[in-house]
Amino acid sequence: MTNTAEKEAQGLEPVRIAVIPGDGVGKEVVPEAVRVLDAVSSSGGALEFVYTDLDWGCDLYRATGRMMPEDGLDRLAHSDAILLGAIGAPDIPDHLSLWGLLIPIRRHFQQYINLRPIRLLPGVVSPLRDREAGSIDMMVVRENSEGEYSVIGGRIHEGTPSEVALQVDYFSRIGTERVMRYAFDLARGRSRRLTVCTKSNGIVHTMPFWDQVAREISTEYPDVEVEFALVDALAARFITHPDTLDVVVGSNLHADILTDIGGAIMGSIGLAPAANLNPERALPSMFEPVHGSAPDIAGKQIANPIGEIWTAAMMLDFLGSRADARRVVDAIEVTLRSGVGTPDIGGSDSTSYVTDAIIDNLPEATD
Ligand code: IPM
Ligand code: MG
């Protein structure tokens, strides 16, 4: 029996994945991640996939004035997960492209957690001196639905000397409690240490509230040691002492910035994976690496596919196939250790060559 027939015989429905490569290097790395998913599936993996390819993004915007069709969100609602590349192009203002596609998906589907592992993999040289593989190994939990990313505000007296632009951050109790609980749970399953990123010395309303909620939730987790770290000092600590950090929870903007530092210290932002999660699984989650559309290197077949492939592994894990997720991450590690890599990590291999190597290095599936 073929693998597909076996899975059908076991009554397993294929997982429906909405695929949005988006713009720039997204168009190159997403097909590579799909190739890996298919290789995982056809080599004894637990899941079978059916894909819906969606050509949404800046090309569509140029043609129609919309980043996605009017019923885009409804169409995505029918999927089990969304695999996305990157959004943005130099000729379209970012606030139009991102708020026309990426941010509405994160919000509509209540993907209020953005989970971003930061790990130095074997065979990769960190820009930090003398760092061994594994010595940087943390998880950033980014609040992904509110905070500084808000549309509350506006502009008055435009174009005059009295012009004012106003943008209001908001932190709800529900939104803050749920991200804290997620982070405490994650810490409980790791080293039982949680760092709460804050800025309550300078931001006088929202950040003291954020800290207060963290303290309240911490009483539910007496076994987790919690520390508070100011975002500026924490940014420095990511560089000087990343080994002292394990789970870090931060607001939407703070953790956005910290995870770019994370990408840098792990050797390339092209390696950094991420997942926009609806932890209740009531709505589809979206799997999207940390890196952007990188128009400067797009179309040259030199984009690092590993961030997207590792992101796809996070999707396998979230969809319940932990063993297959492990196989993909193992294959990435073996590939990097063998010296294969794109130019961003000092190699000279192409995007698809790296993917071929990862597929060749996929370990056997074990039941
Ligand atoms: C990210 C990106 C996005 C964000 C941008 C493109 C809006 O930087 O996912 O980290 O800030 O959320
Ligand atoms: Mg970012």
Image (cartoon, rainbow, N blue to C red):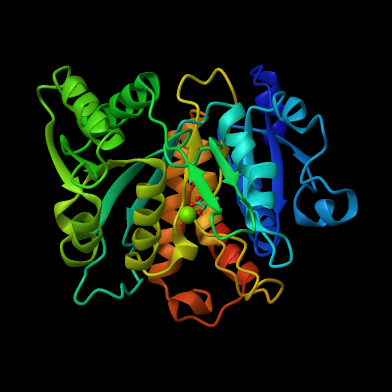
Residue at the extreme right of the image, as rendered: 63
Q: From where the camera sits, is residue 107 visible?
A: yes
Determine whether, in the image, residue 232 is placed left or right of residue 223. Answer: right
Q: Eyeballing the image, is 3 above or below 223? A: below
- Identify the image quadrant of the N terminus: top right
Q: From where the camera sits, is residue 1 visible?
A: no
In the image, what residue occupies the spot 69% across and 55% down? 31
In the image, what residue occupies the spot 26% across and 53% down? 137
Question: Residue 288 location, x and y as percent?
Answer: 55, 47
Q: Nearer the viewer, residue 22 or 189?
A: 22
Question: Residue 51 location, x and y as percent?
Answer: 74, 38
Q: Eyeballing the image, is 17 above or below 117? A: above
In the image, what residue occupies the spot 59% across and 27% down? 109
Determine whether, in the image, residue 318 is placed left or right of residue 30. Answer: left
Quadrant housing residue 353: bottom right
Question: Residue 84 location, x and y as percent?
Answer: 63, 46
Question: Residue 127 location, x and y as percent?
Answer: 30, 76
Number of marks in the rendered image: 0
Q: Eyeballing the image, is 361 above or below 195? A: below
Q: Nearer the viewer, residue 254 or 152?
A: 152
Quadrant housing residue 23: bottom right
